[in-house]
Amino acid sequence: METSANQNASVQAELLRRHKATSTTVIALLVGVMLLCILAFVTKKFLPLQNNPSLDIAVRITILIFGLGSVALRRTKFAAMRLQDIAALKGPTGLLITLQRTTLQVAILGAIVSVMGFAATLLTGNDFYTYGAGLVALAVLLYCYPVRTSWQQAIKRFSPAQNGD
């Protein structure tokens, strides 16, 4: 009985540690996206406006693909059957590692969207790219923000050690 309590305590400590690191990273990326939008606003008067239709279409399509792709990536990686298999093979720690890595991958995709928009703003002088990409990046980052209760429920649901198997 004592071993199970110790194991449960170590899993909870690992969950808190990984959740804090992941949520701190996502918040830092959110702040970075907002800073890029502010920087685009400040530099708007220093950049000459250059019309580039081919870049316009390419940036919009790329932002759309990265935004939708990040949602698809998260949904695929957090599929119930996949998480169940990971928990059965690697235990609760492996499940936590998967939750953390997937969240960070999706968050980085959101940050990449914002950087692409800012780069397009620097190339064309049109600050719409940064604002539009920043909006998509904010949506992706808020969508992937790790909720501790969700992680705890995943551990309870999928970990055999937590279920008493």
Image (cartoon, rainbow, N blue to C red):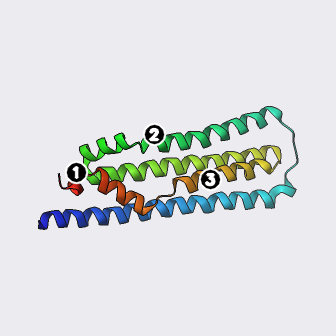
Could you tell me which residue is drawn at 62 percent across and 53 percent down?
A: 139
Q: How crowded is mark 3: few (under 14 residues within 10 Å), some or many (20 or more)?
A: some
Mark 1 and mark 3: Cα distance apart in space: 34 Å
Residue with the mark numbered 1: 160
136 is higher (above) or lower (below) than 81: below
Q: Where is residue 34 in the image (x, y as percent from the top left)?
A: 67, 61
Asked if residue 53 lies left or right of residue 162, the reply is right
Number of numbered discs overlaid on the protein picture: 3
Residue type of the residue flagged with mark 3: Ala
Q: Position of residue 102 (x, y in %)?
A: 44, 48
Circle 3 SS class: helix
Circles 1 and 3, Cβ within 8 Å, touching? The answer is no
Q: Which mark is residue 139?
A: 3
Residue with the mark numbered 2: 76
Query: Of marks 2 and 1, which one's residue comes earlier in the chain?
Result: 2
Query: Of marks 3 and 2, which one's residue comes earlier in the chain?
Result: 2
Could you tell me which residue is drawn at 66 percent across and 37 percent down?
A: 62
Q: Closer to the observer: label 1 or label 3?
A: 1
Query: Of marks 1 and 3, which one's residue comes earlier in the chain?
Result: 3
Asked if residue 70 lies left or right of residue 96, the reply is right
Res. 68 image quadrant: top right
Q: Residues within 10 Å of mark 1 (few under 14, many from 20)?
A: some
Could you tell me which residue is drawn at 78 percent across and 37 percent down?
A: 56
Residue type of the residue flagged with mark 1: Pro
